[in-house]
């Protein structure tokens, strides 16, 4: 068994063949969690999951780039079908998250990829994202659900935020799509978080932070197998062996597992077994 702990079959990119893809995955013993990025995609993830008695789950949350701060213009992603939200509607998300198929709050966190140019606006922008994060952490706490953290170009801020807010820091969480350095990895492990790896491990992103090596080779080697989750983040980050321009799918999570097994000097079957066990433990599935 393999569990893709971070998929987006709830996105517009899969509207034409979603059921076919899910059927193929389940036939190959691959389970998935479809991740919400705003209310519409969260609602869609829940609806999809509720159509399947086993193997398909959902998370709900408002991604930081889908918060309309009024301070930065974000490029519309046609694959997602994004809908910006002026504020986080706690009651609405809470009601949605009460579905038995919802296994987490996420993806939530900090994202500084698009940010204002002036210092004053940057600070306000960051504060708005942190305020959103805090509200969603409180929701996860109230519903006793684990958290799926998104963090891009903001690891130090997220670590500082979680350190300064221990009362809302989740006891169960994953740092999704991790691309940080060894020091940041250790901080998340100190928080007892799981670490999610996806197709970005095949790219050259982050090399300088690790001494010029391939981005995450050393991080994966140093990360305990019992803290690793595997994911695709489909339709993005397709593994190179499947073709550069091909849409990613949950079934391709096998390539991530294979690469991790090579780096850790263990067999593919053990990585499949351990990462599936980790996913079950974190998400209660």
Image (spheres, rainbow, N blue to C red):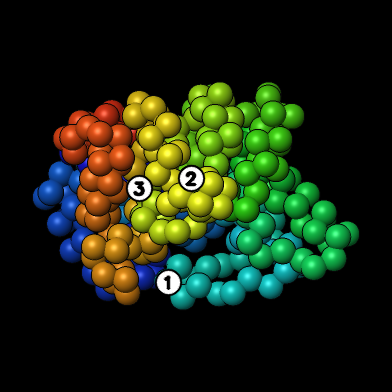
Mark 1 secondary-structure assignment? loop
Residue at position x 39%, y 51% from top? 201
Disc 2 to disc 3, C-alpha distance: 11 Å
* The furthest residue to the right: 120
Above or below residue 252? Residue 72 is below
Dot in front, 1 or 3:
3
Q: Is residue 169 visible?
A: yes
Circle 1 packing at 10 Å, graded few (<14), some (14-19), many (20+), is some
Q: Nearer the viewer, residue 185 or 34?
A: 185
Circle 2 packing at 10 Å, graded few (<14), some (14-19), many (20+), is many
Q: Is residue 214 left or right of residue 188?
A: left
The residue at which mark 3 appears reads as 231
Quadrant of the snapshot with the C terminus: top left
Disc 1 to disc 3, C-alpha distance: 18 Å
Q: Which x, y percent locates residue 254? A: 22, 49
Q: Nearer the viewer, residue 60 or 221?
A: 221
- The image quadrant that residue 246 belongs to is bottom left
Mark 3 secondary-structure assignment? loop
Residue at position x 80%, y 68% from top? 117
Q: Nearer the viewer, residue 87 or 246?
A: 246
Residue at position x 25%, y 51% from top? 255
Q: Is residue 36 left or right of residue 65?
A: left
Ranked by sequence position, the earlier of labels 2 and 3 is 2
Ranked by sequence position, the earlier of labels 1 and 2 is 1
Residue 247 is labelled as none
Q: Which x, y percent locates residue 7? A: 36, 53
The residue at which mark 1 appears reads as 79
Dot in front, 1 or 2:
2
The residue at which mark 2 appears reads as 178
Q: Nearer the viewer, residue 85 or 276?
A: 276
Residue at position x 78%, y 49% from top? 127
């Amino acid at each position: 068994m393999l569990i893709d702990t971070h998929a987006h079959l709830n996105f517009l990119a899969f509207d034409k063949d979603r059921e076919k893809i899910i059927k193929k995955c389940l036939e190959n013993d691959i389970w998935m969690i479809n991740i919400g990025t705003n209310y519409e995609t969260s609602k869609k993830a829940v609806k999809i999951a509720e159509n399947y008695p086993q193997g398909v789950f959902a998370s709900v949350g408002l991604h930081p780039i889908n918060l309309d701060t009024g301070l930065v213009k974000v490029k519309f992603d046609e694959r997602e079908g994004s809908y910006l939200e002026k504020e986080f509607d706690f009651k609405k998300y809470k009601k949605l998250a009460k579905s038995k198929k919802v296994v987490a709050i996420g993806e939530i966190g900090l994202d500084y990829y698009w940010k204002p140019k002036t210092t004053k606006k940057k600070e306000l922008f960051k504060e708005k994202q942190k305020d959103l994060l805090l509200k969603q952490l409180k929701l996860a706490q109230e519903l006793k659900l684990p958290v799926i953290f998104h963090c891009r170009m903001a690891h130090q801020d997220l670590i500082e935020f979680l350190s300064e807010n221990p009362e809302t820091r989740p006891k169960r969480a994953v740092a999704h799509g991790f691309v940080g350095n060894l020091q940041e990895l250790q901080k998340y492990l100190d928080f007892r978080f799981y670490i999610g790896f996806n197709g970005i491990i095949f790219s050259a992103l982050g090399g300088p932070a690790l001494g010029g090596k391939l981005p995450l080779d050393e991080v994966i080697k140093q990360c305990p197998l019992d803290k690793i989750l595997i994911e695709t983040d489909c339709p993005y980050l397709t593994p190179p062996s499947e073709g550069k321009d091909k849409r990613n799918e949950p079934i391709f999570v096998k390539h991530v597992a294979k690469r991790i097994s090579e780096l850790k000097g263990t067999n593919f079957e053990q990585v499949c077994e351990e990462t599936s066990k980790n996913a079950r433990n974190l998400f209660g599935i």
